[in-house]
Amino acid sequence: MDETSTSSPIDPATAFLRARAFHLSGKTRDLGFRLDALVRLEAAIVKKTDAILAALDLDLGKPGLEAWLAEVHFVLTEIRLFRKRLRRWAKPRRVGNPFFVLPARSEVRRESYGVVLIAAPWNYPFQLSLSPLLAAVAGGNAVVLKPSELAPATAGVLQEILGEVFEPGHVTVLTGGPEIGSALLEQPFDLFFYTGGERVGRIYARAAADHLAPVVLELGGKCPCVLAEDVDLDLAVPRIISAKWFNAGQTCIAPDYILVPESLREAFVEKIRALLERVYGTGRPLDLARIVNDGHLQRLLSLCQGKVIRIGEDDLPARLLAPRLLPAARWDDPAMHEEIFGPILPVVGYDDLEEPLARLAEKPAPLALYAFSRDPATLERIAGAIPSGSVCFNDAVKQAVNLQLPFGGVGASGMGRYRGRAGFETFTWERSVTRRYWVKDFFLTLPPYGKTLDWMRRWMK
Ligand code: NAD
């Protein structure tokens, strides 16, 4: 582990048992208790904002604006939403009853699972730890959080903040890498919530199956960005740049590659090159995050084959990779075989829209799909041809900043949803409750049945 990380004071088995004991204490059944914890969490984040931004700078060289907006502000907004809405979301939902059960009162209650494990990745190490965590706490669970070992400074700040905010056992942070992750997976958590790559996602899914527990998988994949013939390039290009190069492309829902009509390819490449040149081509320090480690840096460099347009200068020892366009990419290029997760954008031309749509329908469902066209029918045609966790028309990433929209993948990009109400629902289960009254039953299936069947068949149909 990196020396900047804080080592965990307890082992996974003890962390689990302590969390279970806390949940069994019943404290989290009280909505007031959960809301108080969220109030303290909000206050601690506000107070420690500078330390959080410094950690994100240390781990990923995130520009302050990107770190504040996507991590600190995002989480604060979600806490405030939960504070406002939790009592309403948690209210039992009254339902009717079949006439033969009357008189009765039935309702659906949302119950906490118990102890949940949340494993987070490194690319938005603060947001992707706390967004599920706050939903889990709001749902009344005890939580064990394992932040990513690749963002050790942020893991340290999380440990500090959460240690101050929560009572021991309510939320426990365990830092460390796959060895801690594996040991955690031996514990019988009541729900497993994993964000990260597909390979490790399968490990979480297997562990959840062994414990017969539900699992949420927030995975990645290649998110296509399809431009139609009638696209407004002047509006589309800045939107694509802002979505793609935020966090240096290390965003699970960043546009992974562009599909553009061959007739527009050169015009598109020229416009995006010119704007990239303006925003990233000059001046230092650049407002561009660093690549997380040397392994990823080398992987990204190896994807840049064929024609490459580089904008500005690299600083490889500092893991600063200048934006790159692959202006004449082909489907069989290395960059089209794996999720890029970096500041490289392949541009693939097509002659007839149906051709890439048919190709994409065969590929694993991406986390997000982007389509740009002035024609609503074209947009719907694209969305109808390619299943994806979410869709944004005429922009990218914006669907994921709306806390009223559930977030998650489908197929190979994952399963389960969270954010706002969807998060509350993911971290609670529906318990059906029927209450009957102490009055004489007018309907009871009690032998001898005699002629009751005739009566039933006539009246109940
Ligand atoms: P990763 O799979 O390497 O690690 C994620 C977490 O799993 C870390 O906490 C890590 O320590 C833990 N882990 C690793 N090996 C383990 C093992 N053998 N047993 C138990 N735990 C283990 O993921 P990453 O590289 O940090 O994330 C990048 C991927 O995540 C990309 O594919 C990206 O698209 C995806 N992602 C998805 C979302 C989303 O919301 N859907 C968000 C961010 C990233």
Image (cartoon, rainbow, N blue to C red):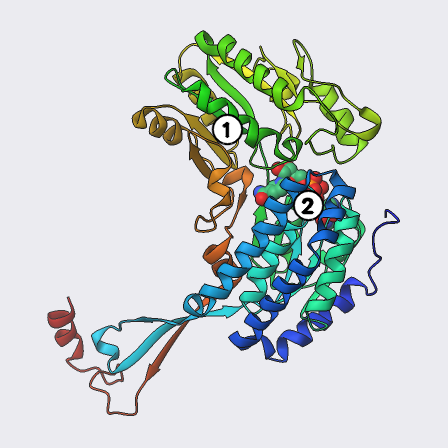
Choose mark 1 or mark 2, whichever is in front. 1
Residue 373 on image: x %, y %: 38, 23
Residue 42 on image: x %, y %: 61, 62
The residue at 47%/55% (across/down) is 422
Dots 1 and 2: beta carbons under 8 Å?
Answer: no
Q: Name the residue under label 2.
A: 121
Image-quadrant location for residue 282: top right
Q: Is residue 263 above or below residue 424?
A: above
Q: How crowded is mark 2: few (under 14 residues within 10 Å), some or many (20 or more)?
A: many
> Which residue occupies the foreground of this view, 456 or 297?
297
> Which residue occupies the foreground of this view, 294 or 356?
294
Q: Can residue 222 be seen in this view?
A: no
Q: Is residue 444 above or below residue 385?
A: below
Horizontal side of residue 31 vs 177, given as left or right: left
Indicate which disc, 1 or 2, sits on the residue closer to the N terminus: 2
**Could you say whether the residue bearing mark 2 is in a helix, strand or loop?**
loop
Horizontal side of residue 165 vs 262, given as left or right: right
The answer to whether the beta carbon of the residue marked 2 is less than 8 Å from any atom of ligand 1 is: yes
| Marks 1/2: CA–CA distance | 26 Å
In the orientation shown, which residue stands out farthest toward the left? 458
Count of labels in the image? 2
Q: Name the residue under label 1.
A: 239
Residue 359 on image: x %, y %: 47, 21
